Image: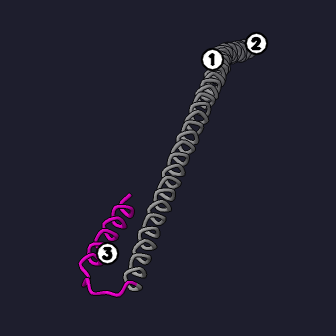
Amino acid sequence: MNKLIAALIAGLFAVSVHAQAPAAATPAAVKAEAKAEKADAKAVKAEAKTDAKADAKVSKAEAKAAKDKAAADAKAAKVEAKATKAKAKADAKADAKVAKAKTGADKTADKADAKVDKAKVEAKADKATAKADTAAVKAEGKADVKAAAAK
């Protein structure tokens, strides 16, 4: 649009400069000058028309680019939302698996602890039994020694 205005103003100045030219010109020169001015005006008009068409074409291309960009952004946002949803679902599933595994590990640890406690109790009982057996054997040995000494 700026080019159009600049071309029209330039044409106006050109016409006004030619209008102030000396009047003592030959009819052929006047005719040639008029023809040149007419051609200049026609060229300026054609240039303005071309500029307007080019500007319209650029505006149309910019609008289409903006529309395409908006569509691409919307599509990217949709894909991102879908990915976020899938990630959240996968995270929840993974968390459930971890919780299940921890529960299983806790149960196994509890069973192992119970076995250890049972083994400790049995070992303590075995120790007590062995101590009692040892005391009985010692007592029996003392009794045998006393009996042998008494004979």
Q: What kind of element bears circle 1? A: helix
Residue picked out by circle 3: 14
Q: Which residue occupies 73% across, 12% down?
A: 147
Local packing at callout 2 (Cα closer than 10 Å; few below 14, some 14-19, many 20+) is few
Q: Secondary structure at mark 2?
A: loop
Magenta-colored segment: predominant secondary structure: helix
The quarter of the picture where residue 110 lies is top right
Dot in front, 3 or 2: 3
Q: Earlier in the sequence, mark 2 or mark 1?
A: 1
Whole-Å distance between the Cαs marked 3 and 2?
Answer: 161 Å
Q: Nearer the viewer, mark 3 or mark 1?
A: 3
List x then y, in percent, for residue 51. Answer: 46, 61
Three-letter amino acid code at disc 2? Lys
Residue 6 on the magenta span: yes
Q: How is the image coloured?
A: one colour
Where is 12 relative to 78, above or below?
below
The tag on residue 151 is 2
> On the rendered structure, is 129 left or right of 51?
right
| Magenta run includes residue 100 | no
Label 3's element? Answer: helix
Q: CA distance from mark 3 to mark 1?
A: 103 Å
| Depth check, front residue: 81 or 140 | 81
| Amino acid type, callout 1 | Asp
CB atoms at circles 3 and 2 under 8 Å apart? no
User: Magenta span covers which residues?
Assistant: 1-27
Q: Nearer the viewer, residue 68 or 146?
A: 68
- Residue matched to label 1: 110
Q: Position of residue 140 (x, y in %)?
A: 72, 13
Q: Please state which amino acid type lies under the numbered disc 3.
A: Ala
123 or 62, nearer to the observer: 62
